[in-house]
Amino acid sequence: MHVSDKGRAFTGAQEGLRLRAYPDVVGVWTIGYGHTTMAGAPFVHPGMVITRVQADQILARDLVRYEDEVLREVHVPLSQCQFDALVDFTYNCGEGSLARAAFLAHLNAGNYGAVPGILMEWDRAGGRVLGDLVRRRRAEGQIFQGHYPWLPAIRVAMGARKMLGAILGKGHPA
């Protein structure tokens, strides 16, 4: 199972695209669509600059890592929406976050309904509640339940991705 185009667009829209390295809200150097060195290569450092194509490639590579984590940790069947939501959560919170999340035990016990509410516990960075994380967890909960919020923004991102692929003559990644 892989993240859908909608799931990839959601993650990209949530992270935003920054082509110049910057310290995130807790001081971790970040670039592209929220890529940090903790996710693997490339090593992010002050002054680093990448292209949009490189950012798309890094996101695709990073998503595979988090897809693998979801597949390894979740032992019950998932719909595409549920998978997309969990990959986005894991991407945003980092490697190992899914295994530490209280909702995982509920999910693996078949209690799918517990997941959206418990997702809301992951609304902090640097010890404080952040509005962006509250909104993101709420949106992940909606996706988990089969509803992609901000569908117009996701469609725009998907359209831009397809257009870029057509310009480059490579299509867009599935």
Image (cartoon, grey):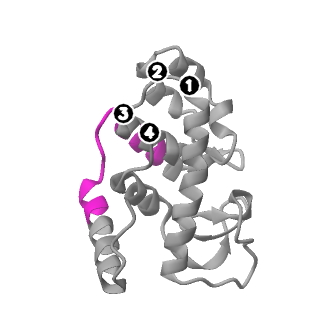
N-term-proximal mark, 2 vs 3 = 3
In front: mark 2 or mark 3?
3
- Residue type beneath disc 4: Phe
Secondary structure at numbered mark 3 = loop
Residue with the mark numbered 1: 103
Which residue type carries mark 1?
Phe
The answer to which of marks 3 and 1 sits earlier in the sequence is: 3
Tell me: 32 left or right of 12. right
Q: Image point 35% across, 56% down: which residue?
A: 5
Q: Which residue is mark 3?
A: 79
- Between the residue at mark 2 and the residue at mark 3, the CA separation in whole angstroms equals 16 Å
Is 46 placed above or below 63 here?
below
Residue name at image x 61 percent, y 51 percent = 65
Quarter occupied by residue 81: top left
| Kind of residue at badge 2 | Ala
Q: CA distance from mark 4 to mark 2?
A: 15 Å
Q: Secondary structure at mark 4?
A: helix
State yes or no: discs 4 and 3 in contact (Cβ < 8 Å): yes
Q: How many marks?
A: 4
Range of the magenta residues?
134-155
Q: Which mark is nearer the camera, 4 or 2?
A: 4
- What residue would you read off at disc 2? 114
If you read the primary sequence from the N terminus, does the residue marked by circle 1 or circle 2 appear first?
1
- Check the image and report above or below for 45 versus 140: below
Visible residue check, residue 1 = yes
Q: Is residue 154 above or below residue 75?
A: below
Q: CA distance from mark 4 to mark 1?
A: 14 Å
Residue 83 is labelled as 4
Of marks 4 and 1, which one's residue comes earlier in the chain? 4
Mark closer to the chain start, 4 or 2? 4
40 or 23: nearer the viewer: 40
Q: Amino acid at mark 3?
A: Ser
